[in-house]
Image (cartoon, helix red, strand yellow):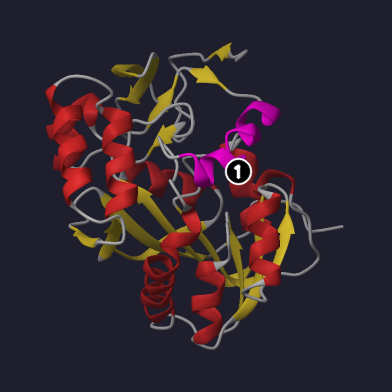
Amino acid sequence: MTVAQRDAAACPACCGSSVVARCACGYRYLRCAECGLQFLDEVLGRSQALQLYSDDYFFGGGAGYPNYLCEAGILIDRGRRYAHIAERYAAAGRMLDVGSAAGFTLRAFADEGWSGMGIEPNRTMAAYAKDVLKVEIVVGSLEEFHTHEMFDLVTMLQVLEHVFDLDAALRSAAEATKPGGLWLIEELDGASPMARLFGSLWHGYSPPSVQRIFSPAALGHLAKRHGFERVAAGRPMRWVSWAHATSLLSYKASKGWMNALVGIAARLLPDELTLPYPGWDLQWALYRKVRSTSSARR
């Protein structure tokens, strides 16, 4: 994979200085000393980044999913919980779901009275969402998304760590949000005790798919830059399938005693088992648009 070396002094969130924080799977993550954002010191181009989300990401295991479609129940339940959070701050309206995959979040919000559309770069996932779940999906990336419509809510659930151009993605999301509209963001928290405890074995360090790992401060800097202020935040309740958990653990512990232990556990427990995920290293935040920072749509 051809990559460009990143200027280690420039944090993408706050322009603070950074140092090497972690080495994982042959990649280096830098950490900003000011806001805590961690990011790869190698810049992936558009085509390289989008290639990461081929069908293999959704069905090949490793840093992705052994079978994403089997996560339907878990992800629809997550979507419903987030719909209830959003409705504390805005009436159900039009939403844009970024990184929609198979449309499970859109389906959950639709069941709670919302309407809207999604963006998804993987054609297989987009086709499933349209044909099976009957939700509207546009194939593409947030960075290149253009529409004359503006939305009451933009959801970005574990999306911003993957985009190939963070500033362009957030600019596009801001332009698609109505004045007073909301962003709902879920991300891994690189400042969490779990991330610090597990170090390079923490599942968040999954390069090159995970290009950046956020702290609450980094998300705040980025939201403010694009005209948004935080109105709520918390730790999500979540469940995870045993098949997905063992796939990630095996990927992170590819050899040694830990991998052997994962292998034994995988044989003893069924893939269909769902487990509570404590959420100590997950964060969600809701931001409201208070000002415009870009030119009007043409």
> Considering only vertical position in the picture, is 109 above or below 164?
below
Determine whether, in the image, residue 81 is placed left or right of residue 294.
Answer: left
Classify the position of the C terminus by image quarter.
bottom right
Determine whether, in the image, residue 183 is placed left or right of residue 139.
Answer: left
> Considering only vertical position in the picture, is 232 above or below 159?
below
> Considering only vertical position in the picture, is 8 above or below 246?
above
Determine whether, in the image, residue 171 is placed left or right of residue 287.
Answer: right
Question: In the image shown, does 17 or 190 lie closer to the viewer?
Answer: 190
Q: Where is residue 56 shown, x and y percent of the image?
A: 56, 39
Whether residue 236 appears in this view of the structure is no
Q: Identity of the amino acid at label 1?
A: Asp
Query: Quick check: is 285 in the magenta stretch?
Result: no
- Write the start and end of the magenta stretch as one range: 46-60
Question: In the image shown, does 131 or 39 lie closer to the viewer?
Answer: 131
Q: Where is residue 249 shown, x and y percent of the image?
A: 26, 37
Residue drawn at 48 percent across, 82 percent down? 90
Q: Where is residue 281 shown, x and y percent of the image?
A: 23, 48
Query: Quick check: is 57 in the magenta stretch?
Result: yes
Question: In the image shown, does 172 or 294 lie closer to the viewer?
Answer: 172
Residue labelled with disc 1: 55
